Amino acid sequence: MTRQLLLIIALVFTTGLTAQERSCSTTELHEQRMENDPVYQKNYLDRQEKFRKLTKERVGVSRAELCPDPVLVPMAVHYADAPNNFDLQCLTDLALDQIQILNDDYQGLNADIVNWTNGTSSNYPGVENAESCIEFCLATMNHPAGSGIAEGDHAVTVNVYGSSSAPAWSGYLNVFVRNIGALGFSPLGGNGNGDGVTCDNSAFGAGAGCTGFVPGAPYNLGRTLTHELGHYLNLAHIWGGGCGNDDGIADTPDQQTSNGGCPGNNAISCGSLDLHMNYMDYTNDACMYMFSAGQQAVMENYLAANLQNVTSNSAVCVPPTPTVAFVQTQTTVSEGTSSCATDGEQQVTIEVGISASPSSTAFVTLLANGTATNGVDYTYSPATLTFPAGQTSNQTITVTIFEDGQVENDESISFSFLVNANGGDAAPGTENQSHEIAILNDDQAPSAGSQNVFLIDQNFDDGIAPFVATDGGDPGNTWYQDGVGSTLNGTPQAIANSDAAGNGSSSNEVLTTPVFNGSSVTNLTLEFDQYARVYSGNGDFNETFRTEIYDGNSWQTVYLRTEAQGSIGDWGNPNHQTINLSAYAAPNNQLRFTYIAEWDYWWAIDNVQVSGLQNVGVQTDANGGSGFSERDFGPNSTLYFYDENSGDVMLSLINTSGFNYGCTSVYVETGSSILPGAFQSNAPESDWITEKTFRVEPENNNPNGSFTISLYYTQEEIIGWSQTSGEPVGNLQMVKAAGSVSSATSLETAPVSTFSFGSDWVYSAQYSSGFSGFALGGAAPVLPVEWLAVNAKAGQKAIDVNWSTATESGNRGFEVLRSEDASKGFSSLGFVAGAGSSTNRQDYSFVDNRALAGITYYYQIRQIDFDGSTSLSPLVNAKIESETLSLRIYPNPVREQLNVELFAPLSGSYELVHVSGLQIASGDFPAGGQRIKLNTSQLSTGIYYLVVSTGEDRRVKKVIVD
């Protein structure tokens, strides 16, 4: 309502609305129009003539004949001056409650009628309380064309009709609710052609009311409309024009003037008790509770005589079908990023309502579709909603959206439902039958160098969420999305509208952004468009427009405008603000916009952006202890891993399979030094490895996995590798180890694709194996000898060892090694010179004449370079097969110890005897190969004989002790 219109109303309604005195302007308005409006005068007199004629005809007709059934009176309620964030369901419920009050009051069913029947009536002989057959109903069907009200919904409009005439609503008893400065007014005898009664927004209905329409004591029990409808049905005020000039009702006593408040039974005028509890007096709501039977007859007769177009329209009062619908149809959220350790998630609530109370408890089964995957991207609860019989409370779905680090397309969840009426009357509605949650991906691939990033980017096109409005003034007049009528740039905006809040309102409205990490960027900047309109008047409230930032410790003002500075911006030509916030940057920054006013104008804002410059570098230092990154690595997903402290990128993973690796940890295992270089590998697959190596450790590994991995290296790291290794950068390949690359003796290599990342580099490779350690490495080392074959072949008394080479480089020669137990080391048998350097096949051989029959010997060739470096051939073995006794002794001559090596197919014995025949030593041995050590250090020099016997086989060896 504009200030000018309120001024006019204030002049017309000279009796103010106070807590002490009821005010009704019906009589004054009626008299003015009778005097100044001939058309009104004629129509009024015609209606009164019809009323008198019908009243005369009904004399002597019984009550049962006049009112065999209730007379339905369809009603429509039109709210004006509602705040922009009005609650239609609340306003509908308020209208239904008010109509129930009307029916109770008119039909004598009101609870406080006991005050009359319990004794008060005895003070008024000849006066009976009314029990009318009029039944008011809030229309639900066959609404006027263009009303915008769906069939089945109640006839309630908001901010559509601003006066006491709505021609489209002819055939209805209309009620207009608005701020009028008096309790109400009505035509004295309505016509049903779109007219109606008007009620103040503080005197309509009962209870807590709704935003902008709150019943105020002592007129908070709904009796104002009871009173005004009495006028509409041709009742005058009970005191009429004073003693001797009463209200024209036979059974109401004369009364000098109105009664206010709650008078006692000593309220006497005109020689009798005043009927001050009558609805047509001016007492408080709690102290009026009856119509008289005479008043009842007047109202029923007037209704029958003049409002047939209303009573014949009763088909619009079909009880509404309880229809189920979502309260809102869309929600938009950013998915969010979290590590698997934090179990990041956010919850979204969706409300489902029912338009009327169902006759039987209804069950609503939810259906979820869309591109998001239930159980992976989100869950919801409950799966079934219950709408109890006789209740209309909204039911809530809680949707839990799981945050992740995946780079993916935006996703959606589309909810619909099935209604099980359970034998009752509940049914799906025709509108709001689905609700879509748009989940916006906020994980992006890194971009090299300094780039402008948005930490907040809100245009309010889809509502004010995730911004949060806090109502700090009169209830309901806070920040809201507005896309109707005037806008800043042709799209929806956020606005706090003090003008719409109305006279006497106060606004202290706060709009708060989500928390953002301002320390993650440089040049932190806030930008927004605005239209801040002030109202300047003598003695009026001085409004303020304030923007603040939370700097991690307290709120700091970064923008302030007051009424004294005047308005700024305009519709279609907003003012643009750019504010540097760098001084306040913190990990937990937050902004809030606060508008403080008292029935002034508004503050509209749009396109709120918080941005800064962000430089994504390449991680070079080891971060396994601090800074490592953990993410859930699910099927067919793409992840980028950053150091949690520096924000620098390490690597990316693309899962090209349906396997779920679970929580996957990534870190730089060995970092680059100040002068990055390379280290020499322990594995033959790659000679020189980059100094920086990585580890990827999934919760669930898959040895047959399929993935693409991309490693990030600085240019300095790559140049350092090349300079240290002496290899060209083109030799680089990716290497993978079962554990740490730095200690691996075997590596799995893969070719790489190379991409620039600013001045740095990305190396990508594909693997079909498990996760482990990763790095870049050069070519395999150049071997001094490329072995073609190595073998050992036993003869009757010796073993021939042969080997061949394909190439040789700087090869001095070969040392032939032998062992009877390869696990316990080898001894050298001899040396064979090599070919030096050769690209042709070379063949070599060595004869082991010291081999005994029956013993398996293991041979290995040690290749020796001219620089002293060595490498080993594969291991081979051979055994001389024999069924006879064989014997070998050494050294001979001997001084300290004689070593005896023998092979015996059978067990036997040995003895050492002097040439004179004296036995020096003896012993037994089992079958097989044997080694016997004989101490000769105490023997005198001379000739001895070793005699070895096995059955009939006997061997003798001459021994010389020196």
Image: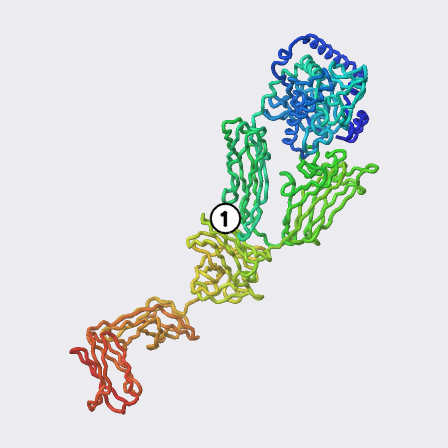
In the picture, the quarter occupied by the N terminus is top right
Q: Tell me: 9 left or right of 366.
A: right
Query: Is 105 above or below relative to 601?
Result: above
Q: In which quarter of the image is residue 828?
A: bottom left
- The reply to whether residue 195 is in sight is no
Corner quadrant of residue 324: top right
Mark 1: secondary structure: loop
Q: Position of residue 618 (x, y in %)?
A: 57, 58
Check the image and report above or below for 22 versus 42: below
Q: From the image, tell me which residue sits under label 1.
A: 637
Number of other residues with Cα within 10 Å of mark 1, as a class: few under 14, some 14 to 19, many 20 or more: some
Q: Residue furthest left?
A: 952
Vertical order, 28 against 884 (above or below) = above
* Residue at 69% over, 46% down: 592
Tell which residue pokes out farthest to the right in this image. 538
Q: Nearer the viewer, residue 373 or 472?
A: 472
Residue 765: % across, % down: 48, 55
Where residue 885 appears, x then y in whole percent?
A: 20, 77
Residue closer to the observer: 80 or 278 = 278
Relative horizontal placement of residue 927, taking residue 505 as reference (left or right): left
Image quadrant holding the C terminus, namely bottom left
Which percent across, then down, holds residue 859? 32, 72
Residue 465 is at least partly visible in this image: yes
Number of numbered labels in the structure image: 1
Q: Nearer the viewer, residue 205 or 210?
A: 205
Q: Give the residue type at disc 1.
A: Ser
Q: In this view, does 549 lie to the left or right of 416?
A: right
Q: How is the image coloured?
A: rainbow
